Image (tube, rainbow, N blue to C red):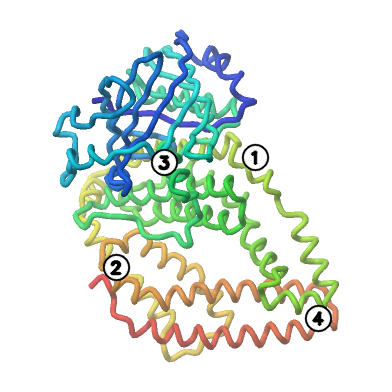
Amino acid sequence: MDTEIELKFLLSDNEVPLIPGLLMQFAKTVNNKPTKQLQNAYFDTPERTLRQFDIGLRTRCCNDECEQTIKLAGEVVGGLHQRPEYNLPISGGRPSIQDFDASIWPAGFDVADIAARLQPIFSTNFTRRKWLVETDQGSVIEVVLDKGEITTGKQSEPISELEIELVEGDREDIFAFAEHLIGQLGVRLGLYSKAARGYRLADGKPLTASHALGFVPLERSATQEEALIAVVGYAIRFVQKHEQCYFDEPKLKTLKRLLDGIALIRHSFWLFDEIVDKSSTEAIRKELKWLIAELSWVENAIQLRTYSSKRHAYYKKINNAPELAQVINDLQDVQPSITDMQDLFHCSRYNRLLLSLTRWLVDKSWRKSWNQKAVMAADKPVLEVAGQLFNRDWQEMRELMRADKSFTAQDYLQLKPHLESTMQNGNCLGALFDKEARRAFRTPWIDIVYGVYELQTLAYLKQLCHSQGDEQLEEIQAWLDQKSGFLVSAMEQSRIASLDNQPYWR
C-alpha cells in the first residue's frame, strides 16, 4: 500500500514545452523516464456502489502489461492529494477485486456481490512523461505530465495535468518546488481527480455552483482543533470548486460563491482565535484581503445585472429612463471581463495564496505559536465551544433586534455585519446539531439576510438615480421607496418570528 502525497496542477498546451527547463532550474539532478501511452478504464456497479464508498477502481494497461488499482477515501486540500492506494497485476483488462487484501475494505462492503456487477464506466487515455527530481536537500520528487482525454460514449474532456509527488524526503521540498512552478507557469492548483471528472461526464452531472455556503461536516466528538482543520479545509475546497465552475460556465453568482468561501476562511481565523494566533495568519490574511479587493466589484455587478434583466421589475422602469439605462450600461462596460477573471485565477499570487493555505493547514502552522492555554483549548470539545458561541450570538441578536423597536431599511443595512458573522458561525459549527431543528431556527434569519441583500440592491439603484439629478427619475425613486417599504414590512415579520424560535443547539 502506498499513500500518495501529491500536488496537482492544471496547465495549458503553451506551458508544456517550458517544463523540462523549469525542472533543471530547480533540481540538483533530473532523471528522465521513458514516455508511456497509458490506457485506463474505471469500473463501478450500475448503482455506483464504489463511488458511494469514495473508492476508485481502475485498470491500466501499457505495453501489454496491466494492473488494477484501488484508491480509498482520502483527503484533498488546496491541490494536495493524499489517498491510500493499492496496486496488483492482472491478466487482461478485467479487474479482480477479490485479489486485494480483505482488510482494506470498509465496513459493509460486499466484495463478492460488487465484483459480480462491475462494469466499465469511462476511460482515461493519455501520454505520460515522467521525471525524477532530486533536490539539493536530498529529497526525491516525481514529476508527471499527463496529456490526453477522458472519454465516455460520445463525450470527452481533455486532460492536461502536472502532478508532483514526494517519493522520499522532506515535505517542505515539494512545497518549495510547487512555489517554483507557480512562479514561472500560469498553472492552477487542481482539486478534482481524473476519476471525479470521469464520473461527472459519464453520469451527465456537470459541476455546478452551490446555492449557498452550506454546513461544514463535523463529528460531535471532534475537538476544537479538529473543527478548525475541517472548517478551513471545507472553505478552501469551496473556493476551488467555484473557481472551476467559473471556468466551466462563467457566471457572476459563481464568483459570489467563491467570495463566500474566502470570507469563511477569514472568519475561521477569528472563530478559532483560542488556538490560532494572529501571527500565524498575518501573511495569509494580507493576501485574502488583496483577493477580496480584486473581487469587490462582484456584488455591484450582480445588482447591475438584475437591473438590466427582463425577468425583473426594474427593467421596464429603467428602460423608461434612458439616462439611467445608459449609466448602468456604462458601469457594466467597465467591469472586469471573463478573461480578466481567468487571468486572475491563473496568476501566481492567487495560486500562491491557495498553496500557502494548504501548507498552513497540512503543517498545522498555528501550533508554532502555541502556549499552554492554546494547547488546552485545542483539545476542548467543539460541541461545548459551539453551544457557548451560539448562546452568545443569540443573546446579541436578541438585543440588537429586540421586539419593542420598529426597524427601518437603514437599521437592517447596519445589521449586515452582525448577521453575516452569526450565519457564518452556523455554517462552521451548525452541523453538530439536529438538521430539522437547525433549519426551522435559521429560516427567518435567512429571510432577513436575503432581505438585506434586496435592500442593498434598491439602495444602489437609488444612489444611481440620485447621482443624475434628473427630475424625470423622481418617479423611479418614489417606486424604489415604496418597494423598500414593502420589503421592510416583510422583514419585520421575519424578525419578530425569529425572536420566538427555540435555539436548536440546546
The amino acid beneath tag 3 is: Ala
* Residue indicated by mark 3: 196
The quarter of the image holding the C terminus is bottom left
Position of 81 compared to 189: left or right?
A: left
Looking at the image, tell me whether mark 4 or mark 2 is earlier in sequence order.
Answer: 2
Position of 456 compared to 79: left or right?
A: right
* Residue indicated by mark 1: 343
Q: Residue at x 54, y 74 (%)?
A: 452
* Residue indicated by mark 2: 435
Q: Nearer the viewer, mark 2 or mark 3?
A: 3
The quarter of the image holding the N terminus is top left
Q: Is residue 117 above or below residue 499?
A: above
**Marks 1 and 3, how far apart at CA:** 25 Å
Which label was assigned to residue 473? 4
Residue 17: percent from left, percent from top: 61, 18
Q: Which residue is most to the bottom? A: 404
Residue 295: percent from left, percent from top: 61, 52
**Marks 4 and 2, how far apart at CA:** 47 Å
Residue 417: percent from left, percent from top: 49, 67
Q: Residue at x 32, y 22 (%)?
A: 92
Q: Is residue 242 above or below residue 38?
A: below
The amino acid beneath tag 2 is: Lys
Looking at the image, tell me whether mark 2 or mark 3 is earlier in sequence order.
Answer: 3
